[in-house]
Image (spheres, grey):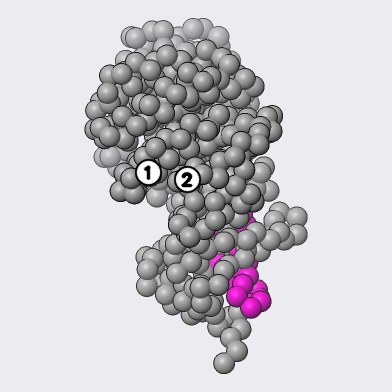
Amino acid sequence: MVKDCVTVWDNCLQTIRRNVNGQSFKTWFDPIRPIRLDNFALTIQVPNKFFYEWLEEHYVALLKLTIRKELGERGRLEYQILTGNNRSQNNELVAVGAGHKNLSRANGNGVSPGGLDTSNIKNPFVIPGIRKIKVDPQLNPTYTFDSFIEGDCNRLARSAGMAVAKKPGGTAFNPLVIFGDVGLGKTHLAHAVGNEVLRTFDNKRVLYVSSEKFTSQIIESIKNNAVNDFVNFYQMVDVLIVDDIQFLANKQKTQEIFFHIFNQLHQNGKQIILTSDRPPKDLDGMEERLISRFKWGLSADLQVPEFETRVAILEAKMNREGVDLPSDVVEFICYNIQNNIRELEGVLVSLIAQSSLNRREIDVELAKDVTRNFVTQINKEITLEFIKNLVADHFSVPVEKLGGKTRKRQFVIARQLSMYLAKHLTDKSLKAIGEMFGGRDHSTVIYSIKTVQDLMETDLVFKDTVSELEKKLKLSLNEK
């Protein structure tokens, strides 16, 4: 029986439906359309690049299983992505499981850059049964300095990363330890350094590895009595990037081997870049000799991005993907998603998906529905009028003065604080808030918010006042 693309994809969907929840199936698989079937390659069309990236990151194993079930071991998927200008671009997903990107780029010549014969050194990144290949950097090419938005929250780390990229192993930033909470861009920045080194230096060997992958490779090398080969491979590298170093905690043998690799690379002037969710001094379960070496270079932290930086990050992502959102939607997202850049992008992905599936216009109401999946509470019932009355009462000023033109300090502070609370505790746009306070423009509202934030940093009494008012407003929300 000759199969057609629709039949093959329908059969795949039956398997997929049994392995994902209903909402995930509706969001990520309903919009897909089968386009053609050429021998063992099924081409499917997805609405935009967001879908392609999400499927590849979260469902590659499931897709591989289903397509091979239908088309055999040679079966594979090809994507057709609809772009903003209605032209399509083809992207091939080679369904061979972990490491598929590496195999698709390998040239398999057994000779490393610079002409050094490495044919006798076992490469732990090569899947058994596949011929040896040169060192693949394991980098995500989309993670670059251009796509890493700079702000006060990350300026030191980004500047240090650029300095390292220009002169790997030749700066005082060796090792470079990038630390911060989840979702603030540590991995992106580490990849950006690696990609910049590759772009600038033809002869540099760059390698990115997660700490979990590194540990599993050590276990495998111990089982195969090949620890020396493992160490020799890593000592070939010019720039070694190890992600989430904190996961090496309490793994004594792994730490011991890493210690020797670290020493050898550092002594030979090679660059080491580490990421962690905490500074080196707080790495519990790590040998003291390793911690002391982590402190040799520079430890640069990534902090929670301020509002303006969050907006810039979201707009940059929109521009790259050819997506245009109303300004009030962008403001709403960035004020409600404050602590995680990854969640910012996740909201954008879900927003586009919901708009595409339900044929709804992207507006603040849709943004509210989507954002509820990422934050526990969306502040929407507190009104601007209520905020004005509460603040006026607290400062003992007439409420109408908050919208007037008087420049007396007590009125200005009350007005600015009202704008700050309005933006943090409601879903109103900057324009709407400005209109409520005497027809002021959005730049005045932004200035007022920044003034309040600055005062909170320098005046503890004022900070307590803000906290007290926020508590009263939130209590009033719970009572409604």
Q: 455 or 156: which is nearer to us?
A: 156
Q: Which residues are magenta?
A: 31-51
x, y percent for residue 33: 60, 71
Which residue position is annotated with label 2?
A: 122
Seen at 36% across and 26% down, the residue is 259
Q: 372 or 298: which is nearer to us?
A: 298
Seen at 38% across and 66% down, the residue is 20
Secondary structure at badge 1 equals loop
| CB within 8 Å, label 2 to label 1 | yes
x, y percent for residue 174: 49, 18
Q: Residues within 10 Å of mark 2 (few under 14, many from 20)?
A: some
Secondary structure at badge 2 equals loop
x, y percent for residue 186: 47, 31
x, y percent for residue 24: 43, 62
Left or right for 85, reference 121: right
Whether residue 36 appears in magenta in the rendering, the answer is yes
Residue 358 appears in view:
no
Q: Residues within 10 Å of mark 1 (few under 14, many from 20)?
A: some
Q: Looking at the picture, does residue 21 appear above or below residue 364?
A: below
Left or right for 18, reference 11: left
Type of amino acid under label 2 = Lys
Looking at the rendered image, the quarter that the N terminus falls into is bottom right
Q: Which mark is residue 226?
A: 1
